[in-house]
Image (cartoon, rainbow, N blue to C red):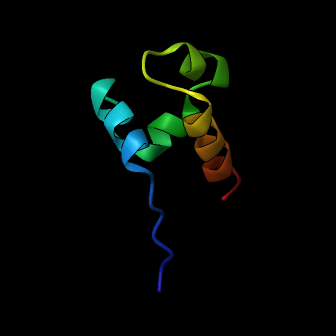
Amino acid sequence: MKNLITISLELQRFMELHKIPNLISLLQIEDEILLGMTGFGWRMMAEVLTLRKT
């Protein structure tokens, strides 16, 4: 059975706000750019870094 990746509601809302279509697209955005985007914070950065490791 495949492992399902779940993301926080906060990160889902951020992706919707910025019209980021999927998790792969999000993970390709550079850290500096993410941190400069409206609504993105350190908690989400920690989540993104964890997702990149998996």
| Residue plotted at (29% across, 26% down) | 17
Work out which residue is located at the far bottom of the displayed protein and give it: 1
Residue 38 image-quadrant placement: top left
Residue 4 location, quadrant: bottom left
Pick the front one: 37 or 42: 42
Rendered location of residue 44, percent (x, y): 55, 37
- Please provide percent x and percent y for residue 50: 66, 51
Whether residue 54 is situated above or below residue 34 in the rendered picture: below
Q: Is residue 33 left or right of residue 14?
A: right
Residue 16: image location, x then y, percent = 28, 33
- Toward which corner of the image does residue 42 lie, by quadrant? top right
Residue located at (59% from left, 42% from top): 48
Q: Residue at x 37, y 32 (%)?
A: 14
From the viewer's perspective, tell me whether residue 2 is left or right of residue 50: left
In the picture as drawn, the residue positioned furthest to the right comes out as 53
Q: Quadrant of the C terminus?
A: bottom right
